[in-house]
Image (cartoon, rainbow, N blue to C red):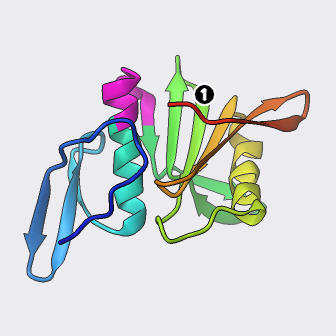
Amino acid sequence: MELPKLNFPSVFNFKLKQDKDKFFIYDEVRKSWFLLTPEEWVRQHWVNYFIKEKQYSRSAIILEKKLIINGLSKRIDLLITEKTEPKILLECKAPSIRLTGKTFEQTARYNSILKAEIIILSNGNHHISAKFLENKYIFEDFQF
């Protein structure tokens, strides 16, 4: 299986396995194997980045948490916490998905519940970052 190279400062070693015609990737936080979708490929790069590059503990990383927004069940991709408080909300898209205002609005809606300081939207190649200050989002150049 040919996996796309993503725009990250490091190359990570992932545990991969194949079962018949499907590929799986091991998640170090959830301690389980997950179907290797393009979105999961991006998510696992971020998980490894936060653990190996930013030195966050696995317990500070929350993956695929369920949220209820306007009576609808939604699921966030990745949340980094500090002392149990939401710090960084990250929405992962497949590398083929273009990041737009609409995809950013989805992440901002999720953050209206969570109240993380920073939100990041990423397709693995492009990363958009914004801080929530004085009731509005201030976009910043994303720096690894």
Rendering coords of residue 98 (x, y %): 61, 67
Specify the principal SS of the magenta part.
helix
Q: Position of residue 18 (x, y in %)?
A: 10, 70
Q: Label 1: which residue? A: 87
Residue at 50% in and 52% down: 77
Name the image quarter holding residue 30.
top left
Left or right relative to 72: residue 5: left
Query: Is residue 64 left or right of 99 when viewed as pictured?
Result: left
Q: Which residues are magenta?
A: 49-61
- Dot 1 surroundings within 10 Å: few (below 14), some, or many (20 or more)? some
Amino acid, disc 1: Lys
> Eyeballing the image, is 100 above or below 63?
below
Q: Residue at x 46, y 52 (%)?
A: 64
Seen at 34% across and 49% down, the residue is: 44
Indicate left or right for 88 with 1 as reference: right
Q: Is residue 58 in view?
A: no
- Answer whether residue 45 is magenta in the image: no
Name the one closer to the observer, 33 or 123.
123
Please count the marks in the image. Answer: 1
